[in-house]
Image (tube, rainbow, N blue to C red):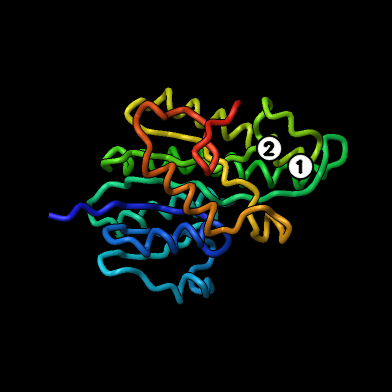
Amino acid sequence: MTTVTTWLITGASRGLGFELVRQLTSMPNNLVIAACRNPSSASQLQALGHAAGAELHTVKLDVNSEESMRASVGQVEAVLKGRGLDYLYNNAGICPRDEAFDFSYSELLSLLQTNIAAPAMMGQLYAPLLAKGAKKTIVNISSGTASIGKDNGTAMATYSMSKTAVNMLTYKQSKARPEFTVISLSPGWVKTDMGGSSAALEPTESAAGQLKVVLGLTKGDSGRFFAYDGQELPW
C-alpha cells in the first residue's frame, strides 16, 4: 500500500506558503492542507492543480484568533479521516521595518501574536494529531535575523525579537516531546510581499531548499536551527 504523507501549511495563500504548497502538490503521495484566513478568496490556491496521487485541501485558519485555530483542528481531522499529521509547517508571519528605539507598541503586540503566540498554540493544538503521524515533525519558520551569533545589526528589531522567541519555542518543544522532530528554519531573504523585490532569492529556490532540509531530517536534528540551504545557524 502506498504511504501518504500529510502536511499542514499555515499562511498558504501567497508567498512562500503558496510556493511550498505548489511544490508539495507537484509530488505524488502528499496530502497537503493549505490553511489561510479566507480560502474562498485565495485565487492562487483555488487555481492550483496537483500531481496524480497528490491531494490538496484548504481550511480556514486565522492565526490571530485562538477560536479559529481551535476550530481548524476539526476541519483538519475531517480531511485526514483518521490519519495522523506528519508535518506541521508554521509559516505564517509578518515583518514590520523598525528599530529598537523606533517602533510601534501596537504593531509589536500584533507581531508577537502572529509570529510567536500562534505557532506556540498551533503546536499545542496539533500535538495529538502529530503524535498519530509517522513523521511527527514541526517546522517553525524563523529567520537569520533571529540569530544573535550572526550579529545582524539594528534593522527589523521587533521581527528579530519575535523570531528569536520562535527559536526558544523550538528548543522547548523538542525537549518536551522528544518523540517529535522540531526545528527552526530560516527561509532566507526571499522575493515576496514581505521580503520585497530586491531580495536575494526567488520563492521557488527557497521553498525547494526548505523541503530538501525538511525531508532529510532525522530525530537527531530536533531542537536545531537551519537555513533553507541546510546550513546550521548559530543561536
Task: Write the residue at 58% across / 40% down.
Answer: 142
- Specify the amino acid type for callout 1: Met
Q: Is residue 193 above or below residue 98?
A: below
| Residue at image coords 57%, 31% | 233
Q: Is residue 226 left or right of residue 75?
A: right
Name the quarter where the C terminus is drawn.
top right
Q: Nearer the viewer, residue 88 or 50?
A: 50
In the picture, the quarter occupied by the N terminus is bottom left
Residue at x-position 69% and y-position 34%: 161
Which residue is denoted by mark 2 in the rendering? 145
User: Which tag, 1 or 2, sits closer to the chain's start?
Assistant: 2
Secondary structure state at the residue bearing disc 1? loop
Residue 98's label in the rendered image is: none
Residue at the disc numbered 1: 156
Q: Position of residue 50 (x, y in %)?
A: 35, 69
Q: Nearer the viewer, residue 234 or 93?
A: 234
Query: Helix or strand or loop: what does disc 2 sit on?
Result: helix
Q: Nearer the viewer, residue 55 or 109?
A: 55
Q: Residue furthest left?
A: 1
Dots 1, 2 in contact, CB < 8 A: yes
| Rendering quarter of residue 156 | top right
Quarter-wise, where is residue 109 in the image? top right
Amino acid type, label 2:
Thr
Q: Give the image location of residue 35, x and y in percent.
A: 46, 59
The percent coordinates of residue 72 (x first, y second) are 42, 55
Q: Is residue 9 above or below residue 156?
A: below
Q: Residue furthest top?
A: 175
- Considering only vertical position in the picture, is 150 above or below 90? above
Query: Which residue is depicted at the point 56% across and 51% down?
Result: 92
